[in-house]
Image: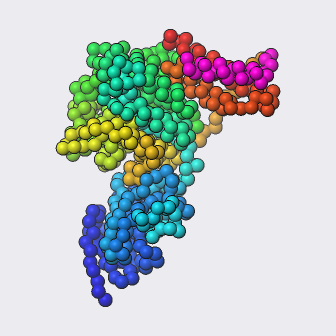
Amino acid sequence: MHKKFIRLAALSCASILLVTNNSVAFAAQGDAVPTDVSLTRQAELFYEFTGNDAGKAGYAQGNLYLFSPVAASYNLYWSDDTGALGRYYPITSLKTGAGETAIFEFGYHVAIPADATKIIAVNASYTEYPTVSSAAAVYDIPADKRLGYSSVDALYTFNSFSDIHIDEEHFGETPAYWWEYSEAHWAQALAYATNLGVDFIVSSGDQVTNAKLDNLDKEWQAYQLILAQSDYVNPIYESGGNHEVRQDDHVPYELQMFINGSGLNSSIDTLAASKPYYTITEPNTGDLFIFMALEGGYRPAKYDEFTTEQLDWVEDLLKENYGKGKNIYLIQHALIKGYGPGDDLETPYYSGSVDPTLPSAQRFISLLEAYPDIVWISGHSHEDFALGYNFTDNNDTSCNMIHNPSVGNPTHVTDGAIDYAFDENLSQGYYVQAFETAILFNGANLCDQKMYPAYTYIIDGSTSLKKQDSRPVTLEKDTEVTPGTLRSVLANANTVLGIYYEFSSYDQYQALKKCYYEYKDADANAMTEAARLTAYSRLKSSIAELYQIADTLQ
């Protein structure tokens, strides 16, 4: 029998593929691989899980082999028992010659998505929805390697965005100076969040561009107006980046603009304290989100960005909450040069990173290493998912570190430097699913609302649902709510939302907007009197809470 040996490339161990007329066998040194697999379809898929997490559910790291007896091109997909998972791009496209094997490698901490039970290879010429029945090859993910959760099991979900970079265009004196598509991309990001039905949004900084101090208030207005005009109705929380404080001689003023523009956690006490850092507690689980801010100015490579007061505050929070059965997220804008994600760790070329020799940076790093189970979410360098610098734990020596690319303008590398060329069809962020024992950061292109299988990361989590006390509705006493009365308060709510749009990132604004959306198309005549009274009371209460915030800041 004629035998042909093909040397495999890009493997974690030395492997040789033996192809015969009707079977494929692997000879390997190191990790075990499948042997003697008979061909039952046009092609065959094999999966070799590698790395320290090879035995853990949900971890995709390893090598995916596609053997084809004929020359062909294939698209590979994560699939459930029916067909390709609809919100994801293909895993990859592979081309083989007759009797050859092509390889795709999943990287460190890449996740097997929720709902995935199979991988399917579909001939690239196939133009219909990729189903299991139409696949040229199917790989059944072993039960102990599947994530173990479906999407409906998520305890909460959120979008993680960064570097939106609203520029001067909407209210400014000139067209956008740097970020040509930032406003359109921000609107698309909000549409994505709305379509996913996420519980909230977090942003890791640079909401605005601040190229000209006179236009800073106008950029915040544009940011808020786009949010107000979107259909997104849930909370949004932001961290302060270096563009929030771009004008070095005006940092206190710029920080106050960030506090007022973002609303922080929407607490009057927090706003009154005028500190640009704050916390959010996820209501269903008690998980903690710590939002930091750059306080030193525009140049993280030169300035001690974190005050001693801020770092004391962070350290106290970690000491108090770490190891208490909750996930802890640290949202802080600027990456650390040569240390974390968002840049090439071997040959860093991004000059704007935090200088790790600065005293505040050294203390910040010490916290990242002392609390290895937390999740640090950063942004700043804008680097496209395709560069592959998006997750690291520094070989288990630090916490889990996730890099956000950019909503406004993801960047590539040209000749060893960041290329800021604009792409109207590219805007990137994460769709995050928190399960009891795992957190999935699904990297996505927000323009076409698709997730990247190769840039979806898994982090071990530890949390659970907690008993929640429902907020009682205080009914308006001695108020007869006729259909006309309800329509009147709805019209008032709509007017208030338009007048106070500059508070659209505040919880109070979003609560009124959500309530308005819930009732705006209701048939007031068909509602019971009790239902009309409840709707009227909720709307009146939400309007009053927004008035209170507006009165505090105006």
Q: Position of residue 272 (x, y in %)?
A: 48, 14
Tell me if residue 267 comes above or below residue 387 in the rendering. above
Would residue 406 appear left or right of 264 to someone viewing this image?
Answer: left
What segment carries the magenta color? 478-499
The quadrant of the rendering that contains the N terminus is: bottom left
**Image spot of residue 475 (x, y percent):** 74, 22
In this rendering, position of residue 108 left or right of residue 486: left
For this rendering, which residue is in front, 139 or 124? 124
Q: Give the residue displayed 34% in from the left and 46% down from the top.
A: 385
Where residue 521 sits: x, y (%)?
68, 32
Residue located at (48% from left, 28% from top): 226
Residue 190 visible? The answer is: yes
In the image, residue 216 sits, relative to residue 436, either above or below, namely above
- Given residues 92 and 491, the one toward you in this image is 491
Q: Farthest residue toward the bottom?
A: 1
Residue 244 visible in the snapshot: no
Image side of residue 516 versus residue 388, left or right: right
Q: Position of residue 357 (x, y in %)?
A: 22, 31
Residue at image x 41%, y 44%?
Answer: 445
Q: Is 171 one of the magenta-colored residues? A: no
State which quadrant residue 26 falls in.
Answer: bottom left
Residue 58 lies, with reference to residue 470, above or below; the image says: below
Secondary structure mostly seen in magenta is: helix
Location of residue 28 with respect to 369 vertically, above or below: below
Q: Quadrant of residue 372?
A: top left
User: Which residue appears at 33% of the width and 75% of the height?
Assistant: 98
Total tally of numbered discs in the picture? 0
Q: Nearer the viewer, residue 83 or 178?
A: 178
Q: Nearer the viewer, residue 114 or 418?
A: 418
